[in-house]
Image: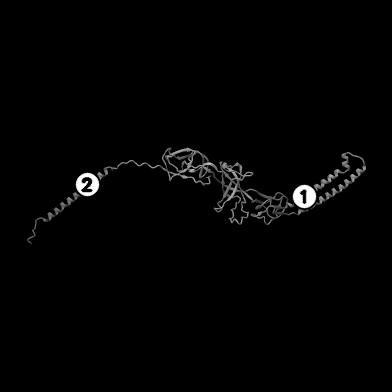
């Protein structure tokens, strides 16, 4: 054994004991650290947070839209929907009995017949014979009258040669005055029968009473017709009517046509027409009865040349106007009479009870009752209750209170001066 190595008794047991002591100290330190962490955590959890209390900032006033009250001359926009009806239509009927021979080639549904044009013809053979018979009867009556006048002249000569004066009654008998009057009456009766037969013959040809469009043929050629049998349905194409209903209070803004004054102008549009096309009409009458369902006033609007049949001016170079058809549903906008001193407001500015909300000089809410002269779908017209340049609140507020502070958005919005009026 080398001299530097010294053998110690029980060396292995000593090493084991030393290692065991190290393990015990490490475990103890771990437990101490764990306990300290738990204590720190418990302390942090149980300590309330320290927050510096500050007063909340004041809420800004609600932001609202306002418009400026500007009195001016304005009229409401009155509009409604109406149905197109014929101003004049006729069902042409035969005034004599007979067989329907034919319709005129132009008498087709959808074709325009000029005034006096032939529409249909009836068989006139029997009526021609009847006319010849009445003419013969008239000739016979005229011959009898001529003979009676000759007898009267002979009686006059005999009476003058008799040399005696008779009473008026006896002189009339001697001069054959009753026979003469009877002969003259027979001539007049025969002449009347001749004229009636001639008129019946003329009535076998039916003619259009005015310029119109054939709506329908009601019978076919070859039909046996009696007096009064309808043959053709004709509609006047010079003018159509449009029947429209409006609220009764709208009548104060309109004026029907009179003897020497035109009625309120009307613009007609339809969904079936191009967007840039419209027709012009005129208010001609207000009907005396109200509509049964909605108690609305009924008006008649006239439209000339509804089918656009009049030839346009070639120099004008304008597109063909849209045609109105019977039964069409069209929208009508009336040109109402304006009134001075009215204020036009959006419908949203009017509150229940005909009140409006105003902003005073300190931007605080004020309530005021106004006089409403017209209520439309988009705008209302106010006649009294507002002064010029007052600011009217348009926006809605959750809990409006008198005197609450408000903020107008972007200043005051003024109503456009070129507006056409309040929409109804």
> Residue tagged by mark 1?
195
Callout 2 secondary element: helix
Q: Residue 194 location in percent, x, y?
A: 78, 50
Callout 1 secondary element: helix
To which quarter of the image does residue 397 belong?
top left
Q: Residue 379 location in percent, x, y?
A: 51, 44
Q: Residues within 10 Å of mark 2 (few under 14, many from 20)?
A: few
- Label count reads 2
To which quarter of the image does residue 61 belong?
top left
Specify the color scheme: one colour
The residue drawn where x is 25% and y is 44% is 43
Q: Is residue 19 left or right of residue 192?
A: left
Asked if residue 215 can be seen in this view, the reply is no
> Residue tagged by mark 2?
36
Q: Quadrant of the N terminus?
A: bottom left
Nearest to the observer: residue 401 or residue 408? 408
Question: Which disc number belongs to residue 64?
Answer: none
Nearest to the observer: residue 76 or residue 298? 76
Q: Is residue 188 left or right of residue 34?
A: right
Q: Residues within 10 Å of mark 1 (few under 14, many from 20)?
A: some
Looking at the image, the residue that sits furthest to the right is: 162
Q: Residue 18 location in percent, x, y?
A: 14, 53
Which circle's residue, 2 or 1, is located before the other in the chain? 2
The CA distance from mark 2 to mark 1 is: 140 Å
Q: Is residue 38 left or right of residue 207?
A: left
């Amino acid at each position: 054994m080398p001299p530097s190595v010294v053998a110690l008794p029980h060396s292995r047991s000593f090493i084991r004991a030393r290692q065991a002591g190290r393990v015990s100290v490490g475990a103890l330190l771990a437990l101490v650290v764990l306990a300290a962490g738990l204590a720190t955590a418990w302390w942090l959890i149980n300590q309330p947070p320290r927050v510096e209390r500050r007063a909340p900032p004041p809420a800004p006033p609600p932001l609202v839209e306002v418009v400026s009250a500007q009195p001016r001359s304005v009229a409401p926009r009155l509009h409604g929907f109406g149905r197109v009806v014929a101003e004049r239509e006729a069902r042409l009927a035969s005034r004599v009995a007979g067989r329907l021979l034919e319709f005129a080639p132009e008498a087709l549904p959808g074709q325009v017949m000029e005034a006096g044009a032939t529409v249909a013809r009836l068989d006139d053979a029997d009526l021609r014979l009847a006319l010849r018979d009445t003419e013969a009867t008239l000739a016979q009556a005229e011959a009898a009258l001529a003979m009676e006048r000759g007898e009267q002249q002979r009686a006059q000569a005999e009476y003058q040669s008799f040399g005696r004066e008779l009473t008026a009654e006896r002189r009339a008998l001697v001069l054959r005055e009753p026979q003469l009057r009877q002969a003259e009456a027979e001539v007049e009766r025969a002449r009347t029968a001749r004229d009636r037969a001639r008129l019946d013959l003329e009535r076998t040809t039916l003619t259009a009473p005015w310029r119109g469009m054939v709506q329908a043929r009601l019978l076919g050629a070859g039909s046996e017709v009696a007096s009064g049998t309808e043959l053709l349905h004709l509609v006047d194409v010079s003018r159509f009517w449009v029947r429209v209903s409006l609220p009764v209070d709208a009548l104060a803004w309109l004026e029907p046509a009179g003897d020497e004054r035109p009625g309120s102008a009307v613009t007609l549009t339809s969904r079936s027409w191009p967007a840039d096309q419209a027709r012009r009409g005129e208010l001609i009458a207000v009907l005396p009865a109200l509509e049964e369902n909605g108690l609305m006033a009924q008006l008649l609007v006239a439209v000339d040349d509804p089918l656009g049949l009049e030839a346009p001016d070639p120099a004008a170079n304008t597109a063909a106007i849209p045609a109105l058809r019977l039964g069409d549903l069209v929208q009508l906008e009336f040109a109402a009479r304006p009134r001075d001193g009215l204020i036009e407001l959006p419908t949203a500015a009017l509150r229940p009870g005909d009140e409006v909300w105003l902003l005073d000089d300190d931007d605080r809410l004020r309530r005021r009752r106004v006089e409403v002269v017209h209520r439309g779908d988009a705008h209302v017209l106010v006649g009294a209750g507002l002064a010029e340049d007052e600011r009217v609140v348009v926006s809605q507020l959750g809990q409006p209170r008198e005197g609450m502070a408000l903020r107008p958005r972007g200043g005051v919005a003024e109503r456009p001066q070129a507006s056409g009026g309040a929409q109804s």
